[in-house]
């Protein structure tokens, strides 16, 4: 059993940004949430102890403790992650330069 039908319906709602119920129109805004293990699994990434387990950037685990940079540093290239890049890296052969991206089936 997969979540494909649910994902297709959710993606449709995200694209339309509105839903009508009983002649009332509701504007929608979506946020991805869940525990970290679930979010990593959903995004097709390795576990939380992997070297590059951050969902939002490609900071190695040995550097996560450093507080020298502001948030913009991690949310801009070359550290920023995108869904397209996660899919691309997961499709690479081997394990080098994949930044813990393993599976595109779920995304």
Image (tube, rainbow, N blue to C red):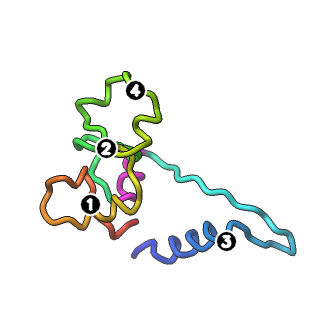
Q: Please tell me whether mark 1 or mark 4 is closer to you in this view.
A: 4
Give the label, 3 or 4, closer to the camera.
4
Q: Let me know if residue 39 is in the magenta part.
A: yes
Q: Residue at x 38, y 50 (%)?
A: 81
Magenta run includes residue 9: no
Q: Establish if 99 lies above or below 25.
A: above
Quadrant assignment, res 41: bottom left
Q: Residues within 10 Å of mark 2 (few under 14, many from 20)?
A: many
Q: Which residue carries the number 2 mark? A: 58
Residue bearing the label numbered 1: 89
Q: Which residues are magenta?
A: 36-43
Is there a contact, CB below 8 Å, between mark 1 and mark 3? no
Query: Pointer 1 and pointer 2: residues touching (CB < 8 Å)?
Result: no
- Cα distance in 3D space between marks 2 and 3: 31 Å
Reply above or below: 80 against 89.
above
Pick whichever, 31 or 78, lies toward us.
78
- Could you tell me how far apart the alpha carbons at marks 1 and 4 are, in whole angstroms? 26 Å
Look at mark 3 in the image and give the residue it sits on: 16
- Residue 70 position within the rendered picture, expressed as x and y whole percent measured from the top left: 45, 28
Say which residue label 4 marks: 69
Q: Nearer the viewer, residue 82 or 38?
A: 82
Which numbered disc, 3 or 4, marks the residue that appears first in the sequence? 3
- Find residue 24 and report its image quarter: bottom right
- Left or right of 26: which side holds 105? left
Q: Residue at x 45, y 71 (%)?
A: 3
In the image: residue 43, left or right of residue 90: right
Q: Position of residue 67 (x, y in %)?
A: 38, 22
Mark 1 or mark 2: name the one nearer the start of the chain.
2
């Amino acid at each position: 059993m997969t979540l494909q039908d649910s994902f297709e319906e959710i993606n449709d709602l995200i694209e339309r940004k509105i839903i009508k119920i009983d002649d009332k129109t509701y504007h929608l805004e979506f946020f991805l949430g869940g525990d970290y293990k679930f979010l990593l699994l959903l995004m097709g990434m390795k576990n939380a102890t992997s070297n590059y387990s951050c969902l939002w950037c490609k900071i190695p685990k040995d550097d996560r403790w450093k507080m020298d940079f502001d948030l913009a540093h991690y949310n801009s290239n070359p550290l920023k992650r995108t869904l397209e890049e996660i899919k691309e890296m997961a499709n690479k052969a081997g394990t080098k330069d994949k930044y813990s991206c393993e599976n595109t089936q779920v995304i």
